[in-house]
Image: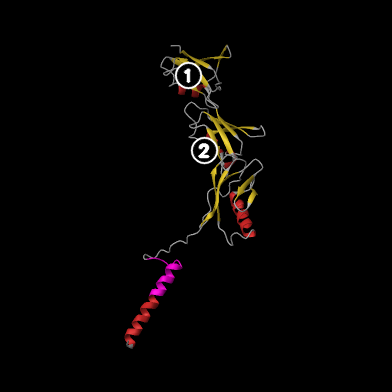
Amino acid sequence: MNIRTFLVALLAGLFSAAGAYAQGAGAAPAGGVAAAPVGPTESASSAYVLGRDDVIEVSLIGRSDFGGRSRVQADGTIQLPFIGKLAVADHTTSEVADMVRAALQKGGYFADPVVSIEVVGYASRYVVVLGAVGTPGMVPINRPYRVSEILARVGGVREGGADYLQVRSTDGKERKLFIRDLATGDISQDPYVQPGDKIYAPAADTFYVYGEVKSPGVFPLTSDMTVRMALVRAGGITENGSDGKVEVERGGKKIKLDPSAKVLPGDVLKIGQRLF
């Protein structure tokens, strides 16, 4: 082999080795965009605090000889291979992953295990949503949720529902939250829910309008609705009607109301004719 051939072979080998090293080190591919390093990512449930009857999937990255599904028992523990009982209640899945890793290292089973834990059955932390919503039921909470987020998850309030929600916590305290405040108010008007909260969307109260209006009938009552607003809801007064002649039957009694007066649940509004 002459010197020229030797040098060409040597340079080709060096370029080949450099290319292999660059690929292994995550160098940029053709196009100039470096490939992101591949590694374990934090799951969406990593901040979830485990409780009784939750079911988790425990596994080791790259290993098939450890793990499986386990349900949190009444005493707050799970059973795992090699480790045995492990108290996990009131710990996040991220914390439990660290506990499993430490136990496996301490027992000498694995030198540097990468533990993955996913919640596959939420049972201990949820809120109950009932009433006039799209899909009433139990909603698991695997992270902090505001009332508006829970309402969105159940499909919102159905037509005919009230313009407010009732939220009862486990200590018996009850709050009344207006839906418009959840949407447009500041964050203090859209509080976080807590495990065990019950959210109820009542059907709207109703009022009745008949007489000299364009669309008499039964209508849902919104908060702070006035007589004038009620008349608009009923299509407005006819040419023969007068808003100065609004008679209201309330609780079995007949009274006269000013157009700016508030309408109450069950009110029956009768719009009389105007005098010519």
Using a 10 Å C-alpha cutoff, classify the residue at mark 2 as few (fewer than 14 neighbours), some (14 to 19) or many (20 or more).
Answer: few
Which residue occupies the foreground of this view, 99 or 235?
99
Where is residue 140? Give x, y as percent: 55, 39
Q: Amino acid at mark 1?
A: Val
The numbered dot on residue 27 is none
Where is residue 150? Give x, y as percent: 53, 38
The numbered dot on residue 218 is 1
Q: Disc 2 designates what residue?
A: 183
Where is residue 85? Give x, y as percent: 64, 48
Residue 188 belongs to the span the image colors magenta: no
Using a 10 Å C-alpha cutoff, classify the residue at mark 1 as few (fewer than 14 neighbours), some (14 to 19) or many (20 or more).
Answer: some
The dominant secondary structure in magenta is helix
Q: Are marks 1 and 2 in contact (CB under 8 Å)?
A: no
Q: Amino acid at mark 2?
A: Ala
- Mark 1 lies on a secondary structure that is strand
- Which image quarter is the C terminus in? top left
Which residue occupies the foreground of this view, 181 or 30?
30
Q: Earlier in the sequence, mark 1 or mark 2?
A: 2
Q: Which residues are magenta?
A: 16-29
- Mark 2 lies on a secondary structure that is helix
